[in-house]
Image (cartoon, helix red, strand yellow):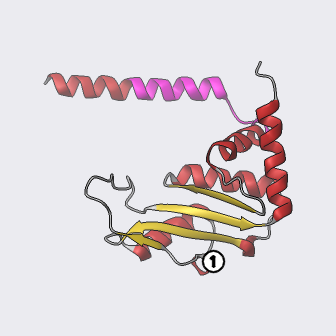
Amino acid sequence: MGANRLREARIAEIEEMDRLGSARLGPLTEHAFLAAGAALYAGDGGKGDGRIVFAGSEAAMVAFFLAWLRCFFSIDESRLRVAIYLPTTGDLAAAEAFWSSATGIPVSQFTKPYRTERAPSARASPTGHGSARIVYSCARTHRGVMGLVRALLSSTPP
């Protein structure tokens, strides 16, 4: 009974923090969206020259990043690539369908998946769809993204 009450209290607190977070953040302005995407790439994006690389197992995060990239840069959709990282026990066809839906990138633009035996101590992907690595090869776009990242990191906090 006690564990159930603790669980219910935790869920209630999470819901309250979600409401407060939404109220505090409000709708994203174009400027806030630009800064959020630059911050996301600063933390999780590839820093090598010539291509945009972003990977994650959280579909909403990957979709947010792609929405940002598509919003602020002129993207040739046919040059977007997705590589799936999935344990050999995972359902590749289901993972491809999942990530294609989440990214808006057709499966025909997916590269060879990375399949591996999962170590017994490794945590399984919460969705069971593994993770996706997005690659967009364009040096000019990458330099534009990194210009935003450098501007963000050199700005003075309020």
Q: Secondary structure at mark 1?
A: helix
Is 45 magenta? The answer is: no
- Label 1 sits on what residue type? Gln
Determine crowd level at label 1: few under 14, some 14-19, many 20+ residues with C-alpha closer than 10 A.
some
Classified by dominant secondary structure, the portion drawn in magenta counts as: helix
Report how many numbered discs are placed on residues in the image. 1
Q: Position of residue 150 (x, y in %)?
A: 80, 40
**Residue placed most toward the observer, 29 or 96:** 96
Q: Position of residue 152 (x, y in %)?
A: 78, 35
Q: Quadrant of the C terminus?
A: top right
Q: Position of residue 4 (x, y in %)?
A: 20, 28
The residue positioned 38% from the left and 55% from the top of the image is 125
**Residue placed most toward the observer, 14 or 69:** 69
Is 22 magenta? The answer is: yes
Residue at the left extreme of this rendering: 1
Q: Is residue 116 left or right of residue 31?
A: left
Residue bearing the label numbered 1: 109
Residue at the front extreme of this rendering: 48
The residue positioned 55% from the left and 70% from the top of the image is 83
The residue positioned 63% from the left and 77% from the top of the image is 109
